Amino acid sequence: MSSEVAVDHRQQAYDLLKADADKIARLIKVQMDNLTMPQCPLYEEVLDTQMFGLSREIDFAVRLGLIREEDGKALLENLEQEMNALHEASQKS
């Protein structure tokens, strides 16, 4: 495999993981925009499941050497911060 192809695969892997992270971020935003509704345990379970799935995808990509561990951790940390903001906002409503 040429170096150029390897870089392309790494970028594709990161782009796919970023797209999944963005999808979860949109779910979080929808929930934050609708905090006038009672907190929904099912919605939180979906978010938790999505986060777990993304963490497994990231672990797999790291083990394959497709993304750096730091980049994967950064994706998860950003989402965790958004989930924490959602949780704090739901406690205030």
Image: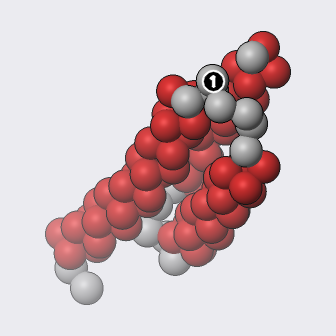
- Would you place residue 39 above or below residue 5 in this image? above
Q: Position of residue 32 (x, y in %)?
A: 57, 28
| Residue drawn where x is 37% and y is 55% of the image | 19
Q: Position of residue 81 (x, y in %)?
A: 65, 30
- Would you place residue 7 above or below residue 18 in this image? below
Question: Is residue 25 shown left or right of residue 19?
Answer: right
Q: How many residues crowd mark 1 within 10 Å: few (<14), some (14–19), many (20+)?
A: few
- Mark 1: amino acid: Thr
- Would you place residue 55 above or below residue 91 in this image? below
- Would you place residue 46 above or below residue 93 in this image? below
The reply to whether residue 66 is visible in this rendering is yes
Report the residue that reaches farthest toward the bottom.
Answer: 1
Q: Which secondary structure, mark 1?
A: loop
| Residue drawn where x is 78% and y is 14% of the image | 92
Q: How many callouts does the rendering have?
A: 1
Question: Is residue 21 shown left or right of residue 15?
Answer: right
According to the image, label 1 marks what residue?
36
The reply to whether residue 48 is visible in this rendering is no
| Residue drawn where x is 70% and y is 19% of the image | 89
Colour convention of the picture:
secondary structure
| Residue drawn where x is 55% and y is 30% of the image | 34
Q: Position of residue 72 (x, y in %)?
A: 55, 52
Q: Which quarter of the figure is the C terminus placed in?
A: top right
Q: Which image quarter: residue 87? A: top right
Which is more toward the observer, 87 or 66? 87
Q: Which image quarter: residue 83? A: top right
Q: Which image quarter: residue 49? A: bottom right
